[in-house]
């Protein structure tokens, strides 16, 4: 029988059916960080339980780490308590911890892939909704709550219901200046922020076949913003090429065996999907969010919609968004003044993101009055960026170069918006208050669009600002 | 693990209108800096309930007559965004024992169920009707019958949505599956043994 990747992985990891009808699903790889794990370890201690597979859990610290001054103790005593708690838990339970001094610390969704921990045909869970990122490798990867973190630690399984699968084809060619970020923002805008409830998204088509692993990760990362708990791309030569030689990947004879196994996990040609959506790449333009959820987005040459023109349900949220964002309905999004520019996060904090923005920032200056920061997603990304001279480009352009962490994506560290500052951001969420100030405003876009906003001081079409004619890689 | 059988929840309601309410709004990230869930109740919807100086803003959860409410009425896609269990934990610790909405984000739904705080779906019109009754009289009692999948308010019965598996796990006291997950050690061993990357 022809099966899709989701079904193959699901069946291979099913350990039984629970009395509730849910599946007991084996979690092959478990990633943890400091925010959603301490209570889980507390529950384990309370129940007197140990770890089922300590070698299958990997930890790092990302949300609360300061990105400028990292000497310990941290100036924030609560943040300091959290990193110490994670160290204690990893030590007590024998968990590998990519801690600050290891040179491998970073955002959990960047660390897993770059170390080769993230592999095709596996199940990956983490107490973090952006775990969907790992689906780029053909893994079934999803976020879980803290009580489920406990379940994985104690049993290496969780109770879960099978998802339906929606295949999303993006065919054709993306125009220059249009990136993976624009593709996923367009998908969310098209299918809605509730559209993915009950679904896993399988991304495919010519654009995804040409995409690099880092571009695939950007798209899969934001699956959850469209309500799909996981999103994935079938593994192919691009995937294997990326993984070869990574520290946690099989090597030698094991490598060939692993590749054969991974290849066999890809969806069979002609398999069943619960739904299929076709998107034409040439319909996608550089996209910017104007509202308070990632589906409220327009192309850079469009106007902010008039809420009255929207359907019931969308209208009320749009009205709330216009008030929060202090925008005028019907006005062009281009030209909106910004205060802060942020390049980083698990969506766009990888080397290729830093390279692409740097390529165009060379010789340019951040607009006076704009605070611009660039935060590598991991220590390894930071080291490579430095080696390639990107740091110097960013410094000369007027960006502050920071150390690895989640930083201003959710502002659990000192990197926060102040008052109603408006931030052009490469992150994944524009929720009210997301970037640390209850009245702060976020507009999501690609790294190049953030670079354009940084140098002009306002939301701008990067293609015009930088004269992009061949900027996009696909 | 012996758990309470949750068959019925009766109490006053509190209505938070609006769709796509995300978990950052339910509990802002700065209140996740903790190693225990204790005390999170006071931070539920913090930025909507308090201004920058900590002064109360007009919000249903700040109104005296709603402070003992145990049933939350919401819109669609409630709890979207972050997987933070701190969100349902903060509502639970505020005193909420059931959430009625048009639809729920999946991770929030699962986190709430595993906490013993069921989320049931109701038609938008039903929510509006109950909200109107509550507006007229905050003491209006709402009865959530898990076994019958129905919500009763002022004598009117509204059919509610609840997946069968969730329903049985609530009424039979198995809403936290840890016991069952632990019991099937053999089944888990077999699967792990069959997966090369786990060995």
Image (cartoon, helix red, strand yellow):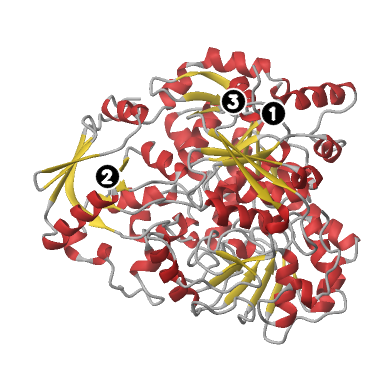
Q: What is the chain identity of the residue bearing mark 2?
A: B
Q: What is the chain identity of the residue bearing mark 1?
A: A
Question: Looking at the image, which is closer to me, A396 or A205?
Answer: A205
- Which residue is denoted by mark 2 in the rendering? B97
Q: Position of residue A190 (x, y in %)?
A: 56, 54
- Which residue is denoted by mark 1 in the rendering? A267
Any part of residue B134 in sight: yes
Which residue occupies 54% across, 14% down? B187
- Which residue is denoted by mark 3 in the rendering? A10
Which residue occupies 84% across, 35% down? A237
Question: Looking at the image, which is closer to me, A46 or B47?
Answer: B47
Q: Secondary structure at mark 2?
A: loop
Q: Secondary structure at mark 3?
A: helix
- Badges 1 and 2: C-beta atoms under 8 Å apart? no
- Badges 1 and 3: C-beta atoms under 8 Å apart? no
Q: Nearer the viewer, mark 1 or mark 3?
A: 1
What is the CA distance from the residue labelled 1 to the residue labelled 3? Answer: 12 Å
Which residue occupies 49% across, 24% down? A23
What is the CA distance from the residue labelled 3 to the residue labelled 2? Answer: 33 Å
């Amino acid at each position: 029988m022809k099966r899709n990747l989701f079904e193959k992985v699901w069946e291979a990891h099913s350990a039984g059916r629970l009395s509730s009808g849910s599946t007991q699903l084996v979690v092959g790889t478990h990633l943890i960080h400091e925010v959603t794990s301490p209570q889980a370890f507390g529950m384990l201690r309370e129940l007197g339980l140990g770890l089922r597979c300590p070698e299958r859990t990997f930890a790092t610290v990302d949300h609360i780490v300061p990105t400028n001054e990292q000497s310990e103790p941290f100036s924030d005593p609560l943040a300091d308590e959290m990193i110490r708690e994670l160290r204690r838990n990893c030590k007590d339970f024998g968990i590998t911890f990519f801690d600050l001094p290891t040179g491998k610390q970073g955002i959990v969704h960047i660390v897993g892939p770059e170390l080769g921990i993230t592999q095709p045909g596996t199940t990956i869970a983490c107490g973090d909704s952006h775990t969907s990122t790992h689906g780029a490798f053909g893994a079934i990867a999803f976020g879980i709550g803290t009580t489920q973190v406990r379940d994985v630690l104690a049993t290496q399984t969780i109770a879960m219901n099978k998802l339906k699968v929606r295949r999303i084809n993006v065919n054709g060619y993306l125009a220059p200046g249009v990136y993976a970020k624009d593709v996923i923002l367009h998908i969310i805008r098209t299918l809605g922020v509730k559209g993915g409830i009950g679904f896993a998204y399988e991304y495919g088509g010519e654009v995804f076949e040409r995409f690099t692993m880092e571009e695939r990760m950007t798209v899969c990362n934001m699956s959850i913003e469209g309500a799909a708990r996981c999103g994935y791309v079938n593994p192919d030569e691009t995937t294997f090429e990326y993984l070869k030689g990574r520290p946690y990947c099989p090597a030698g004879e094991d490598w060939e065996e692993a590749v054969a196994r991974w290849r066999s996990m890809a969806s069979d040609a002609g398999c069943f999907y619960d739904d299929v959506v076709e998107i034409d790449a040439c319909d996608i333009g550089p996209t910017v969010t104007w509202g308070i959820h990632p589906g409220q987005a327009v192309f850079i040459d469009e106007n902010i919609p008039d809420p009255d023109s929207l359907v019931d349900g969308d209208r009320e949220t749009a009205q709330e968004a216009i008030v929060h964002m202090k925008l005028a309905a019907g006005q062009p999004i281009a030209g909106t003044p910004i205060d802060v520019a942020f390049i980083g996060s698990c969506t766009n904090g990888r080397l290729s993101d830093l390279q692409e923005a740097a390529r165009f920032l060379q010789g340019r200056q951040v607009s006076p009055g704009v605070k611009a920061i660039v935060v590598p997603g991991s220590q390894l990304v930071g080291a490579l960026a430095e080696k390639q001279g990107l740091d110097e480009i960013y410094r000369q352009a007027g960006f502050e170069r920071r150390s690895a962490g989640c930083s201003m994506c959710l502002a659990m560290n000192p990197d926060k918006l102040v008052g109603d500052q408006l931030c052009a951001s490469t992150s994944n969420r524009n929720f009210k208050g997301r970037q640390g100030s209850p009245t702060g405003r976020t507009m999501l876009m690609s790294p190049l669009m953030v670079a354009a906003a940084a140098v002009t001081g306002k939301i701008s079409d990067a293609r015009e600002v930088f004269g992009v004619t061949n900027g996009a890689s696909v | 693990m012996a758990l309470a059988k949750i068959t019925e929840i009766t109490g006053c309601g509190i209505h938070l209108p609006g769709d796509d309410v995300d978990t950052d709004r339910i509990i802002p990230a700065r209140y996740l800096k903790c190693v225990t869930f204790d005390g999170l109740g006071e931070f539920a919807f913090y930025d909507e309930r308090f201004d920058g100086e900590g002064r109360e803003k007009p919000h249903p959860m700040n109104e005296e007559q709603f402070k003992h409410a145990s049933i939350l009425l919401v819109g669609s896609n409630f709890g979207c965004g972050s997987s933070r269990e701190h969100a349902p934990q903060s509502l639970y610790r505020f005193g909420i024992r059931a959430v009625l909405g048009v639809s729920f984000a999946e991770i929030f739904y699962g986190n709430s169920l595993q906490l013993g705080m069921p989320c049931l779906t109701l038609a938008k019109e039903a929510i509006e009707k109950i909200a109107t009754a509550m507006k007229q009289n905050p003491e209006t009692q709402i009865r959530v019958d898990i076994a019958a999948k129905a919500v009763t308010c002022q004598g009117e019965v509204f059919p509610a949505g609840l997946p069968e598996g969730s329903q049985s796990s609530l009424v039979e006291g198995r809403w936290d599956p840890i016991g069952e997950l632990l019991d099937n050690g053999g089944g888990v061993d077999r699967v792990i043994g069959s997966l090369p990357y786990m060995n």
